[in-house]
């Protein structure tokens, strides 16, 4: 949060760029490389089944991957290229039942067909995604 406030002040010209040291620039560069951020969605009902969607699709700068879990479990959310090679792990860990969103930043990937696969306990689902730059 502090990083975002400082970044906003620098962009607004309220803090001169000359006052920003190399460490801050490294933090900003690291922040920009983060490709996924979890955002649990408030939901009063527990989903009845695993559900995976992404939007927009096709997309060009990034896509939001949303999924619902019917029960607390270990979850893996991975991206594969058209050759079936794993190219990114968006999430791997335990989550409670509910609905979640992750944003996939595709700035380092080429246009093409990709697959998003979620696995949780006995459930799994794969979606086709199209990146058009």
Image (cartoon, grey):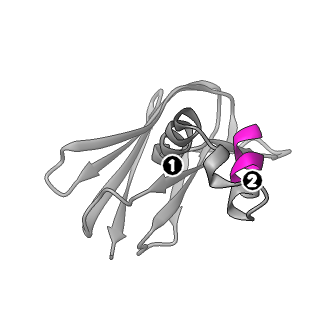
**Which element type, helix, strand or loop, lies under badge 2?**
loop
Could you tell me which residue is drawn at 70 percent across and 54 percent down? 16
| Residues in magenta, as a range | 1-7
Task: List the single residue furthest toward the front.
Answer: 18
Q: Which mark is residue 73?
A: none
**Which element type, helix, strand or loop, lies under badge 1?**
helix
What secondary structure is the stretch in magenta mostly built from?
helix
Figure check: 121 above or below 68: above
Pick whichever of labels 1 and 2 is earlier in the sequence: 2
Q: Which mark is residue 32?
A: 1
Query: How far apart in space, not on screen, are marks 1 and 2 (Cα)?
Result: 20 Å
Magenta run includes residue 5: yes
- CA neighbours of label 2 inside 10 A, class few (<14), some (14 to 19), many (20+): some
Figure check: 69 above or below 104: above
Where the C terminus falls, by quadrant?
Answer: bottom left
Could you tell me which residue is drawn at 81 percent across and 47 percent down? 43
- CA neighbours of label 1 inside 10 A, class few (<14), some (14 to 19), many (20+): few
* Nearer the observer, 69 or 49: 69
Note whether residue 53 is visible.
Answer: yes
Figure check: 96 above or below 48: above
Horizontal and vertical percent position of residue 50? 55, 44
User: Toward which corner of the image does residue 112 lie, by quadrant?
Assistant: bottom left
For the residues carrying marks 1 and 2, which lies nearer the camera in this image?
Answer: 2
* Nearer the observer, 47 or 107: 107
Which residue is tagged 2? 15
Horizontal and vertical percent position of residue 18? 62, 49
| CB contact under 8 Å: marks 1 and 2 | no
Note whether residue 1 is visible.
Answer: no
106 displayed left or right of 52:
left
């Amino acid at each position: 949060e502090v990083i975002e406030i400082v970044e906003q002040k620098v962009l607004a010209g309220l803090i001169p760029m000359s006052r920003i040291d190399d460490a801050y620039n490294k933090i900003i560069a690291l922040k920009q490389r983060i490709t996924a951020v979890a955002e649990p969605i408030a939901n009063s009902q527990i989903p009845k089944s695993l559900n995976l969607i992404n939007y927009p699709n096709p997309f060009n700068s990034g896509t939001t991957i949303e999924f619902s879990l019917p029960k607390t479990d270990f979850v893996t959310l991975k991206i594969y290229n058209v050759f079936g090679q794993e190219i990114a792990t968006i999430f791997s860990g335990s989550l409670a039942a509910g609905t979640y969103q992750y944003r996939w930043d595709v700035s380092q990937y080429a246009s093409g067909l990709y697959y998003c696969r979620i696995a949780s306990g006995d459930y799994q689902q794969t979606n086709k995604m199209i990146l058009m730059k």
